[in-house]
């Protein structure tokens, strides 16, 4: 018996009602279940922005290395470095040739990425960090052309277009191969199956003997506070080195005017976002999975570093 008889009755009534409407309207197309509507061409175009390795999906447009240099300096350099070397924990885009077999390979567009289409797709979809999908098609082509130039894959007079972009081959393309495993699905045993109760698992491996709790506690490092954990995972990428005008952790001069506005203002700017004279703070630093309490804890942690 349902614990919620009223809800059950309502659900049953709605179900019967939709069934009656379905039966009465034979004109509905196959796959229509009585709710929603077909996506429009404009709606589909807003989502259908991926680019395939063969170039399918690239829009009309063009951009030169020369134009890309200015756009890159304005939109990309504060995160990815002036020459694609990367800032802080943002990924580098150039360099690393011949490093993939080293203990710590340096993965960049020139050393690791398989296709130029991946680069175009990433730039158009995610750049800049504070305003993704704000670049035009021509601006995207120009930035892509400049990143290719930073990796010495094109000349300084190269102009990237819808027609010629996929002709640029990245050095590591040959090391990416199509999935080799067959697309199979295991079949369920339907007869003469073994009784699960009769199956015995044996192992010659030595018995696992857990380390005493006291020894684990003595060896464990000090636990991070909630604020420090959030800071390390989501805030340090900008606040550890001042990316995008972010106040640097531990720098009193960067924080004094902000602290003077009070904790409520600090919290509100961090949660809702803030545009100042210098730099941009996206809502929750761009990590919308964080709760308001997570953000407040991270702010408290950063402010607390000024007292150390």
Image (cartoon, helix red, strand yellow):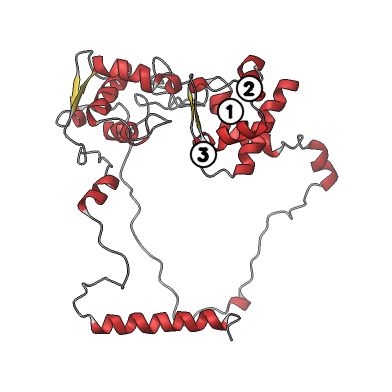
Q: Which residue is mark 1?
A: 236
* Cα–Cα span, label 1 and label 3: 12 Å
Q: For marks 1 and 2, give the one nearer the viewer.
A: 2
* Left or right: residue 81 compared with residue 40: right
Query: Mark 1–mark 2 contact, CB under 8 Å?
Result: yes
* Mark drawn on residue 287: 3
Residue 168: x and y in percent read 22, 26
Residue 265: x and y in percent read 61, 32
Q: Residue at x 45, y 24 (%)?
A: 106
* Mark drawn on residue 249: 2
- Residue 215 in view here: yes
Q: Residue at x 24, y 84 (%)?
A: 24
Relative to 33, residue 295 above or below: above
Query: Mark 2: which secondary structure?
Result: loop
N-terminal of the pair, mark 1 or mark 2, is: 1
Q: Quadrant of the N terminus?
A: bottom right
Residue extending furthest bottom? 1
Q: Residue at x 56, y 19 (%)?
A: 241
Q: Nearer the viewer, residue 219 or 7?
A: 7
Query: Mark 3: which secondary structure?
Result: loop
Residue extending furthest right? 214
* Cα–Cα span, label 1 and label 2: 8 Å
* Left or right: residue 155 compared with residue 14: left
- Residue 149 in view here: no
Relative to 175, residue 41 above or below: below
Residue 153: x and y in percent read 27, 20
């Amino acid at each position: 018996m349902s614990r919620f008889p009223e809800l059950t009755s309502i659900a049953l009534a709605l179900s019967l009602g939709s069934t009656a409407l379905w039966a009465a309207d034979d004109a509905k197309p196959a796959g229509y279940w009585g709710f929603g509507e077909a996506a429009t061409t404009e709606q589909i175009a807003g989502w259908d922005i991926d680019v395939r390795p063969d170039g399918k999906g690239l829009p009309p447009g063009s951009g030169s290395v020369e134009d890309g240099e200015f756009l890159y300096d304005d939109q990309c350099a504060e995160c990815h470095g002036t020459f694609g070397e990367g800032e802080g924990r943002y990924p580098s885009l150039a360099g690393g040739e011949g490093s993939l077999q080293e203990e710590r390979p340096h993965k960049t567009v020139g050393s690791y990425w398989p296709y130029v289409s991946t680069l175009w797709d990433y730039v158009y979809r995610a750049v800049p960090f504070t305003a993704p999908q704000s670049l035009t098609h021509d601006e995207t082509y120009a930035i892509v052309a400049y990143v290719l130039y930073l990796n010495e894959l094109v000349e300084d007079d190269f102009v990237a277009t819808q027609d010629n972009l996929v002709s640029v081959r990245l050095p590591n393309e040959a090391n990416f191969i199509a999935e080799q495993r067959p697309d199979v699905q295991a079949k369920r045993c339907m007869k003469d199956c073994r009784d699960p109760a009769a199956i015995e698992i044996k192992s010659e491996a030595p018995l696992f003997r857990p380390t005493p709790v006291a020894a684990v506690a003595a060896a464990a490092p000090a636990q991070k506070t909630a604020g420090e954990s959030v800071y390390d995972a989501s805030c340090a990428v900008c606040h550890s080195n001042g990316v995008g005008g972010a106040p640097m952790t531990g720098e009193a001069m960067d924080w004094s005017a902000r602290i003077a506005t009070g904790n409520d203002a600090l919290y509100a700017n961090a949660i809702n976002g803030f545009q100042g004279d210098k730099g941009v703070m996206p809502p929750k630093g761009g990590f919308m999975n964080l709760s308001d309490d997570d953000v407040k804890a991270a702010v408290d942690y950063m402010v607390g570093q000024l007292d150390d």
